[in-house]
Amino acid sequence: QVPLVESGGGLVQPGGSLRLSCAASGNIFRNNDMAWYRQAPGKERELVASINRFGSTDYADFVKGRFAISRDNAENTVFLQMNSLKSEDTAVYYCNLRYGFVNWGKGTLVTVSS
């Protein structure tokens, strides 16, 4: 069973919005803090946002006020609502645990371009 499957990426113009989803297996999702990460071409993977099992959230400074992370515990799914997208948000987006990683999924590509 693939532990993490990301979806929802695509091509969007600057200022646009996208909503990413991450389906996680129950064993991974349950009682774990989850997070979204991203990796832009030529750069290291970086933390974007995290959410604990109670719903408390935290964001990297570069997405504060624009992105929102949420989770559906019944569906073992984590979401990332991305608004006011900028060209520098272009990256492959991944979800994983916030602390200690499981095998990475394939990610979903977000391209912000006019």
Image (cartoon, rainbow, N blue to C red):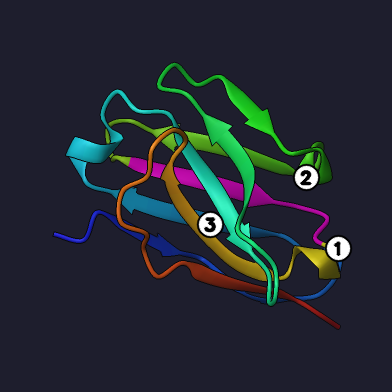
Q: Is residue 80 magenta?
A: yes
Q: Disc 3 on helix, strand or loop? A: strand
Amino acid on which disc 2 is placed? Val
Q: Earlier in the sequence, mark 2 or mark 3?
A: 3
Which residue is depicted at the point 40% across and 70% down? 106
Image spot of residue 50 (x, y percent): 56, 34
Q: Is residue 12 left or right of residue 4?
A: right
| Residue position marked by numbered label 2 in the rendering | 63
Is residue 20 inside the magenta stretch?
no
Distance in Å between CA atoms under marks 1 and 2: 13 Å
For discs 1 and 2, the disc positioned in front in the rendered view? 2
* Disc 1: which residue: 15
Q: Which mark is residue 20?
A: 3
Secondary element type, mark 2: helix
Q: Residues within 10 Å of mark 1 (few under 14, many from 20)?
A: some
Please report whichever mark, 1 or 2, sits nearer to the chain's N-terminal start: 1
Question: What's the residue at 42%, 28% (across, down)?
Answer: 33
Q: Which percent across, then down, holds residue 12?
A: 73, 74
Mark 2 vs mark 3, foreground winner is 2
Mark 1: secondary structure: loop
Query: Considering only vertical position in the picture, is 75 above or below 2?
Result: above
Q: Is residue 102 above or below residue 92?
A: above
N-term mark: 3 or 1? 1
**Callout 2: few (<14), some (14-19), or many (20+) C-alpha neighbours within 10 Å?**
some
Q: Amino acid at mark 1?
A: Gly
Residue pictured at 68% horizontal, 69% vertical = 40
State whether residue 9 is above or below residue 31: below
Give coordinates of residue 54: x percent, y percent: 44, 16
Q: Are marks 3 and 1 in contact (CB under 8 Å)?
A: no
Q: CA distance from mark 2 to mark 3?
A: 14 Å
User: For this view, does 1 lie left or right of residue 109?
Assistant: left
Residue range of the region highlighted in magenta in the rendering: 77-85
